[in-house]
Amino acid sequence: MTFPLFITLLILTATLIVMWNKLRKARRAEYIRTYSLPDGLFERLRKRRPELSLKECQLVSHALRQFFLAYLKSGCKFVAMPSQVADDLWHEFILYTKNYDLFCKHAFGGFLHHSPAVVLSTAQQNNTGLRRCWWHTCREENINPRDPTRLPLLFALDAKLKVADGFHYVADCSSVRRKSTGNDSGGAVYCGGDFSSSGFDGGTDGFGDASSADGGGLGDGGSGCGGGGCGGGGD
């Protein structure tokens, strides 16, 4: 085999691998969007949150799908959950152990462990996970993550449903600032625009170039699942 032919075959192979990974990620994303949640899941959520209507439960499920898509599109890197009520549904879903395990295998190629909902804080890992989640949920709704005019559903959900212990965000930081600092408890209002600043964790994760935004070129991210980067097993 001549050297030019070897180089051509190498380039062709690499191109095919990239195309296959993109196709597999697209299929996994479609699986997440169209997956039928287990029967009885909304009833379990309404036991936790009796104030929710069936229509509102469906909205929560849409927000949870946004979270799963953010995890997939990050290359299965750590992403943090910004909504208390979506976290409740995630927790109930996990209790359907066989369904959840099969879902994770098809959606991510490995198990996604639960981690509690968090808000912006001085903890660098939490902020990094939230920034990744913010970036990908914004892109899912065609929102500019650096200069948002509205919130993606996952970040707007708790306030929209008036969740008493929820985490409330606003898109515009100019008129509303947090009422308390260094406090991760519910009740405070957090600004979505803060995610475009490096002031919280000193980093730019999720706000760099296109490759880092898509998970650093990790293909569909399947190989990243099942370890500490999948949420750390909060339960």
Image (cartoon, helix red, strand yellow):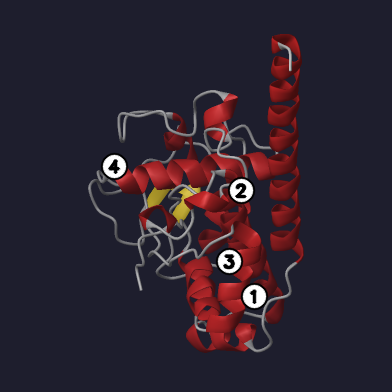
Q: Residues within 10 Å of mark 4 (few under 14, many from 20)?
A: some
Q: Quadrant of residue 3?
A: top right
In the shown orientation, is residue 225 left or right of residue 21?
left
**Which of label 3 and label 4 is nearer to you?**
3
Q: Secondary structure at mark 1?
A: helix
Q: Above or below — where is 185 with respect to 190? A: below
Q: Secondary structure at mark 2?
A: loop
Q: Above or below — where is 220 with respect to 66? A: above
Residue 225: mark: none
Q: In the rendered structure, are the residues bearing label 3 and label 1 in contact, judged by CB atoms less than 8 Å apart? A: no
Q: Looking at the image, is mark 3 or mark 1 earlier in the sequence?
A: 1
Please give the residue where the numbered disc 1 appears in the rendered image.
Answer: 57
Q: In the rendered structure, are the residues bearing label 3 and label 2 in contact, judged by CB atoms less than 8 Å apart? A: no
Q: In the rendered structure, are the residues bearing label 1 and label 4 in contact, judged by CB atoms less than 8 Å apart? A: no
**Which of label 3 and label 2 is nearer to you?**
3
Question: Looking at numbered disc 4 in the image, what kind of residue is underneath it?
Answer: Gln
Q: Residues within 10 Å of mark 2 (few under 14, many from 20)?
A: many
Q: Position of residue 180 (x, y in %)?
A: 26, 49
Question: Looking at numbered disc 3 in the image, what kind of residue is underneath it?
Answer: Cys
Please give the residue where the numbered disc 3 appears in the rendered image.
Answer: 104
Q: CA distance from mark 1 to mark 4?
A: 32 Å
Q: Position of residue 24 (x, y in %)?
A: 72, 49
In the shown orientation, is residue 178 left or right of residue 156?
left
**Which of label 4 and label 2 is nearer to you?**
4
Look at 30% across and 29% down and name the residue there: 202
Q: CA distance from mark 3 to mark 2?
A: 23 Å
Q: Residue furthest front?
A: 1
